Image: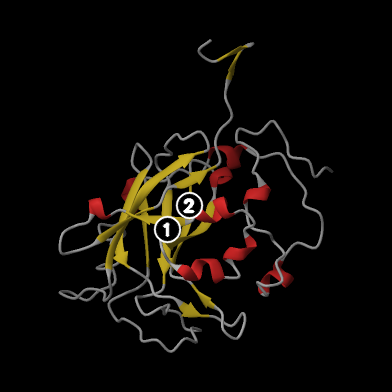
Amino acid sequence: MSNQPKTNSGYMVRDRAWHPRAYAPAYKTSVTRAPSKALLSFPSSLGENTGPVFGHDIIGPLDNDLILNYAKPGEMALGPRIIVKGRVIDEHGKGVPGSLLEFWQANAGGRYRHRNEKYLAPLDPNFGGYGRTITDETGAYEFRTVQPGPYPWPNGMIDWRPAHIHFSVFGQAFAQRLITQMYFEGDPMIWQCPIVSTIDQKEAIETLVAALDMSQTVPMDARVYVFDIVLRGRRQTFFENRWEGA
Protein backbone atom coordinates (compact mmCIF):
# COMPACT_ATOMS: atom_id res chain seq x y z
CA MET A 1 0.00 0.00 0.00
CA SER A 2 1.38 3.40 -0.97
CA ASN A 3 0.41 7.00 -0.44
CA GLN A 4 2.26 8.10 -3.58
CA PRO A 5 0.07 9.19 -6.52
CA LYS A 6 -0.14 6.71 -9.38
CA THR A 7 1.13 7.77 -12.80
CA ASN A 8 -0.86 5.38 -15.00
CA SER A 9 -4.16 7.18 -14.69
CA GLY A 10 -5.66 9.08 -17.61
CA TYR A 11 -5.89 12.28 -15.56
CA MET A 12 -3.44 14.67 -13.96
CA VAL A 13 -2.61 14.13 -10.30
CA ARG A 14 -4.41 16.60 -8.05
CA ASP A 15 -2.31 19.38 -6.56
CA ARG A 16 -3.45 19.06 -2.96
CA ALA A 17 -1.55 22.20 -1.94
CA TRP A 18 -3.97 24.15 -4.16
CA HIS A 19 -7.03 22.77 -2.37
CA PRO A 20 -8.34 23.61 1.12
CA ARG A 21 -6.74 22.12 4.19
CA ALA A 22 -8.85 19.27 5.58
CA TYR A 23 -7.98 20.23 9.16
CA ALA A 24 -8.50 23.90 10.05
CA PRO A 25 -9.51 24.56 13.69
CA ALA A 26 -11.02 27.98 12.88
CA TYR A 27 -13.56 26.05 10.77
CA LYS A 28 -14.85 24.01 13.70
CA THR A 29 -16.55 21.11 11.94
CA SER A 30 -13.34 20.36 10.05
CA VAL A 31 -11.80 19.14 13.31
CA THR A 32 -14.06 16.07 13.39
CA ARG A 33 -14.37 15.68 9.60
CA ALA A 34 -10.66 15.75 8.75
CA PRO A 35 -8.93 12.40 8.07
CA SER A 36 -7.04 11.12 11.09
CA LYS A 37 -4.76 8.82 9.05
CA ALA A 38 -2.37 9.43 6.15
CA LEU A 39 -4.09 9.52 2.76
CA LEU A 40 -3.61 6.57 0.42
CA SER A 41 -3.56 6.80 -3.36
CA PHE A 42 -5.19 4.03 -5.41
CA PRO A 43 -5.01 3.47 -9.16
CA SER A 44 -8.14 4.77 -10.85
CA SER A 45 -10.59 2.27 -12.29
CA LEU A 46 -11.95 2.15 -15.84
CA GLY A 47 -15.29 3.43 -14.57
CA GLU A 48 -13.67 6.43 -12.89
CA ASN A 49 -11.89 7.35 -16.12
CA THR A 50 -14.79 6.88 -18.54
CA GLY A 51 -18.13 7.53 -16.84
CA PRO A 52 -20.70 8.88 -16.30
CA VAL A 53 -22.15 10.35 -19.49
CA PHE A 54 -25.08 12.78 -19.39
CA GLY A 55 -27.43 13.77 -22.19
CA HIS A 56 -29.24 17.06 -22.72
CA ASP A 57 -32.55 15.19 -22.65
CA ILE A 58 -32.32 14.90 -18.84
CA ILE A 59 -32.52 18.70 -18.43
CA GLY A 60 -35.93 20.34 -18.14
CA PRO A 61 -36.76 23.65 -19.88
CA LEU A 62 -36.55 25.70 -16.66
CA ASP A 63 -33.83 23.76 -14.84
CA ASN A 64 -31.32 26.57 -15.45
CA ASP A 65 -33.72 29.38 -14.46
CA LEU A 66 -33.97 29.65 -10.68
CA ILE A 67 -36.12 32.77 -11.01
CA LEU A 68 -38.94 30.71 -12.56
CA ASN A 69 -38.33 27.00 -11.90
CA TYR A 70 -40.02 27.01 -8.48
CA ALA A 71 -42.38 29.94 -8.96
CA LYS A 72 -46.14 29.78 -9.22
CA PRO A 73 -47.61 30.61 -12.65
CA GLY A 74 -47.24 34.33 -13.27
CA GLU A 75 -44.89 34.79 -10.29
CA MET A 76 -41.08 35.13 -10.00
CA ALA A 77 -38.41 34.87 -7.33
CA LEU A 78 -37.57 38.07 -5.43
CA GLY A 79 -34.14 39.68 -5.38
CA PRO A 80 -31.45 41.23 -7.59
CA ARG A 81 -31.53 39.28 -10.84
CA ILE A 82 -28.26 37.93 -12.18
CA ILE A 83 -26.97 35.60 -14.88
CA VAL A 84 -24.02 33.34 -14.07
CA LYS A 85 -22.09 32.08 -17.05
CA GLY A 86 -18.66 30.73 -17.93
CA ARG A 87 -16.82 27.68 -19.21
CA VAL A 88 -15.88 24.35 -17.71
CA ILE A 89 -12.31 23.67 -18.86
CA ASP A 90 -9.54 21.24 -17.99
CA GLU A 91 -6.04 22.04 -16.75
CA HIS A 92 -4.88 22.53 -20.34
CA GLY A 93 -7.59 25.11 -21.09
CA LYS A 94 -9.66 22.72 -23.20
CA GLY A 95 -13.45 22.95 -22.85
CA VAL A 96 -15.21 19.98 -21.25
CA PRO A 97 -18.48 19.43 -23.15
CA GLY A 98 -21.36 17.48 -21.66
CA SER A 99 -20.47 18.36 -18.05
CA LEU A 100 -23.41 18.24 -15.65
CA LEU A 101 -23.56 21.28 -13.36
CA GLU A 102 -25.88 21.32 -10.37
CA PHE A 103 -26.13 24.49 -8.28
CA TRP A 104 -27.92 25.51 -5.10
CA GLN A 105 -28.03 28.63 -2.95
CA ALA A 106 -29.78 30.70 -0.31
CA ASN A 107 -32.43 33.18 -1.38
CA ALA A 108 -31.90 36.94 -1.63
CA GLY A 109 -32.38 37.25 2.13
CA GLY A 110 -29.74 34.61 2.89
CA ARG A 111 -32.11 31.77 3.79
CA TYR A 112 -32.13 28.21 2.46
CA ARG A 113 -35.30 26.23 1.87
CA HIS A 114 -34.40 23.54 4.40
CA ARG A 115 -36.38 22.12 7.29
CA ASN A 116 -33.46 22.56 9.70
CA GLU A 117 -32.68 26.15 8.71
CA LYS A 118 -32.25 28.30 11.84
CA TYR A 119 -31.78 31.75 10.27
CA LEU A 120 -34.93 33.87 10.69
CA ALA A 121 -34.79 35.61 7.32
CA PRO A 122 -38.05 35.11 5.37
CA LEU A 123 -38.56 32.36 2.82
CA ASP A 124 -39.46 33.31 -0.73
CA PRO A 125 -42.42 31.11 -1.75
CA ASN A 126 -41.36 31.41 -5.40
CA PHE A 127 -37.71 30.42 -4.96
CA GLY A 128 -36.53 26.84 -4.58
CA GLY A 129 -32.81 27.60 -4.66
CA TYR A 130 -31.54 24.85 -6.93
CA GLY A 131 -31.10 24.05 -10.61
CA ARG A 132 -28.89 22.29 -13.15
CA THR A 133 -27.56 22.52 -16.68
CA ILE A 134 -25.16 20.77 -19.07
CA THR A 135 -22.23 22.43 -20.84
CA ASP A 136 -22.33 22.80 -24.63
CA GLU A 137 -19.74 21.54 -27.12
CA THR A 138 -17.27 24.28 -26.06
CA GLY A 139 -17.73 23.70 -22.31
CA ALA A 140 -19.89 26.82 -21.89
CA TYR A 141 -22.78 27.04 -19.43
CA GLU A 142 -25.27 29.67 -18.27
CA PHE A 143 -28.07 30.00 -15.73
CA ARG A 144 -30.31 32.73 -14.33
CA THR A 145 -30.99 33.33 -10.64
CA VAL A 146 -31.16 35.99 -7.91
CA GLN A 147 -28.07 37.08 -6.04
CA PRO A 148 -28.03 35.20 -2.72
CA GLY A 149 -27.69 37.05 0.57
CA PRO A 150 -25.08 36.42 3.30
CA TYR A 151 -26.15 34.63 6.44
CA PRO A 152 -24.92 33.88 9.99
CA TRP A 153 -23.80 30.38 10.90
CA PRO A 154 -22.99 28.73 14.24
CA ASN A 155 -19.23 28.42 13.80
CA GLY A 156 -18.40 31.39 16.02
CA MET A 157 -20.44 34.07 17.74
CA ILE A 158 -20.08 36.59 14.90
CA ASP A 159 -19.32 34.40 11.87
CA TRP A 160 -21.24 35.01 8.66
CA ARG A 161 -20.94 33.29 5.29
CA PRO A 162 -20.36 35.62 2.35
CA ALA A 163 -22.90 35.45 -0.47
CA HIS A 164 -22.17 32.32 -2.50
CA ILE A 165 -23.53 29.68 -4.85
CA HIS A 166 -22.68 25.99 -4.45
CA PHE A 167 -21.65 23.97 -7.51
CA SER A 168 -21.49 20.23 -8.09
CA VAL A 169 -19.75 19.35 -11.37
CA PHE A 170 -19.49 16.02 -13.18
CA GLY A 171 -17.04 16.27 -16.09
CA GLN A 172 -16.41 13.51 -18.60
CA ALA A 173 -15.57 11.01 -15.85
CA PHE A 174 -15.81 10.54 -12.09
CA ALA A 175 -12.13 11.53 -12.00
CA GLN A 176 -13.29 15.06 -12.90
CA ARG A 177 -15.84 15.28 -10.08
CA LEU A 178 -15.80 18.64 -8.30
CA ILE A 179 -17.83 20.32 -5.55
CA THR A 180 -17.07 23.99 -4.96
CA GLN A 181 -18.50 27.41 -4.18
CA MET A 182 -18.63 30.65 -6.14
CA TYR A 183 -18.31 34.06 -4.47
CA PHE A 184 -18.99 37.55 -5.80
CA GLU A 185 -16.46 40.17 -6.82
CA GLY A 186 -16.05 43.00 -4.31
CA ASP A 187 -17.54 41.20 -1.29
CA PRO A 188 -15.33 42.03 1.76
CA MET A 189 -16.82 39.14 3.73
CA ILE A 190 -14.96 36.61 1.54
CA TRP A 191 -11.72 37.39 3.37
CA GLN A 192 -13.32 37.03 6.81
CA CYS A 193 -14.86 33.59 6.26
CA PRO A 194 -13.32 30.65 8.19
CA ILE A 195 -14.23 28.24 5.39
CA VAL A 196 -12.50 30.37 2.75
CA SER A 197 -9.51 30.67 5.10
CA THR A 198 -8.86 26.93 4.82
CA ILE A 199 -7.37 27.74 1.39
CA ASP A 200 -3.77 28.86 1.93
CA GLN A 201 -3.05 30.55 -1.40
CA LYS A 202 -4.68 33.89 -2.19
CA GLU A 203 -4.48 33.11 -5.90
CA ALA A 204 -6.51 29.95 -5.33
CA ILE A 205 -9.21 31.89 -3.45
CA GLU A 206 -9.42 34.39 -6.28
CA THR A 207 -10.34 31.58 -8.70
CA LEU A 208 -13.54 31.15 -6.65
CA VAL A 209 -14.60 34.78 -7.13
CA ALA A 210 -16.89 35.50 -10.07
CA ALA A 211 -16.14 38.68 -11.99
CA LEU A 212 -18.91 41.19 -12.63
CA ASP A 213 -19.14 41.83 -16.39
CA MET A 214 -21.35 44.86 -16.94
CA SER A 215 -20.71 44.72 -20.70
CA GLN A 216 -22.97 41.65 -20.84
CA THR A 217 -25.74 43.16 -18.71
CA VAL A 218 -29.28 42.47 -19.91
CA PRO A 219 -30.81 46.00 -19.92
CA MET A 220 -33.46 46.53 -17.24
CA ASP A 221 -33.16 42.89 -16.22
CA ALA A 222 -29.96 41.24 -14.96
CA ARG A 223 -26.27 41.77 -14.29
CA VAL A 224 -23.82 39.09 -15.44
CA TYR A 225 -21.16 37.32 -13.38
CA VAL A 226 -18.53 35.21 -15.13
CA PHE A 227 -17.22 32.11 -13.39
CA ASP A 228 -14.92 29.60 -15.12
CA ILE A 229 -14.44 26.17 -13.56
CA VAL A 230 -11.25 24.12 -14.01
CA LEU A 231 -11.38 20.32 -13.80
CA ARG A 232 -8.56 17.79 -13.85
CA GLY A 233 -7.01 17.47 -17.30
CA ARG A 234 -6.10 14.36 -19.23
CA ARG A 235 -2.44 13.56 -19.78
CA GLN A 236 -0.92 13.76 -23.26
CA THR A 237 -1.45 10.56 -25.24
CA PHE A 238 1.76 9.07 -26.69
CA PHE A 239 1.84 7.68 -30.22
CA GLU A 240 4.32 4.79 -30.06
CA ASN A 241 7.59 6.49 -29.04
CA ARG A 242 6.76 9.97 -30.33
CA TRP A 243 4.67 12.86 -29.06
CA GLU A 244 1.35 12.88 -30.85
CA GLY A 245 1.66 15.02 -33.97
CA ALA A 246 5.46 14.93 -33.97
Amino acid at the residue labelled 2: Val
Between 64 and 213, the residue placed more toward the observer is: 213
Quadrant housing the N terminus: top right
As helix, strand or loop, the secondary structure at mark 1 comes to strand
- Residue 15 lies, in percent from the top left, at 65, 44
Q: Residue at x 31, y 49 (%)?
A: 57
- Residue 217 lies, in percent from the top left, at 22, 56
Q: Which residue is mark 1?
A: 102
In the image: residue 77, left or right of residue 130: left
The vertical placement of 204 against 155, above or below, is: above
- Please report whichever mark, 1 or 2, sits nearer to the chain's N-terminal start: 1
* Residue 169: image tag: 2
Marks 1/2 in contact by CB < 8 Å: the verdict is yes
The vertical placement of 39 against 31, above or below, is: above
Amino acid at the residue labelled 1: Glu
Which quadrant holds residue 153?
Answer: bottom right
